[in-house]
Image (cartoon, rainbow, N blue to C red):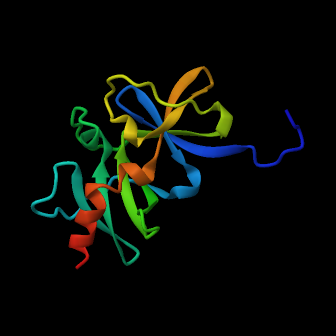
Amino acid sequence: MNSDTTNVADKYLTFVLATEEYAVDILRVQEIKGWNKVTTIPNTPEYICGVINLRGTIVPIIDLRLRFQLERLAYGAMTVVVVVKVLSATKKERIMGIVVDGVSDVYDVAEEKIKPPPDFGSVISTEFVKGLATVDNKMVIILDIDRLLNSNELAIVDSLSQ
């Protein structure tokens, strides 16, 4: 291995949902906020909590527990919203918030340490998983945030902004 290679590892923000630890590319994370009341939007899927006004930008808030069909939890002092930048297939940038149980840590994960997801039943569809990595003796599920928040969510966001 070439020891003078720079930038060999990407940084990932990890967060917890139920008993699993998930990660997103930290370059996509805009900010981390505590839970605040949202404005609900009628006729949206259950996992879309509503929208917030973040310094003049309308930001849809997605509950990842509900998106992954996990048990609903009441929002409390530990509930966190991770505000992320999402790119559509046409590279249009959106700001969205994802509700998680709590933020864990930031880890450096080298690309070669990310293994493809297994091909068997999982809580979440593997189409949203970039891969799996072992960090500090625990398995972390690295999410493809663009795929996860691009299917129905962006179509809904587009309809809200018109």
- At a point 29% along the width and 38% down the height, the residue shown is 68
Along the line of sight, the residue nearer the viewer: 109 or 83: 109
- At a point 43% along the width and 70% down the height, the residue shown is 92
Residue 140 appears left or right of 114: left
Residue 89 vs 103, above or below: the answer is below
Q: Quadrant of residue 151?
A: bottom left
- At a point 43% along the width and 68% down the height, the residue shown is 90
Q: Position of residue 111 (x, y in %)?
A: 65, 39
Residue 136 in view (yes/no): yes
Q: Position of residue 162 (x, y in %)?
A: 22, 79
Residue 5 appears left or right of 101: right
Q: Quadrant of residue 41?
A: bottom left
Residue 110 in view (yes/no): no
Along the line of sight, the residue nearer the viewer: 60 or 74: 60
Residue 40 appears left or right of 14: left
Q: Position of residue 106 (x, y in %)?
A: 60, 42
- At a point 27% along the width and 43% down the height, the residue shown is 67
Along the line of sight, the residue nearer the viewer: 13 or 133: 133
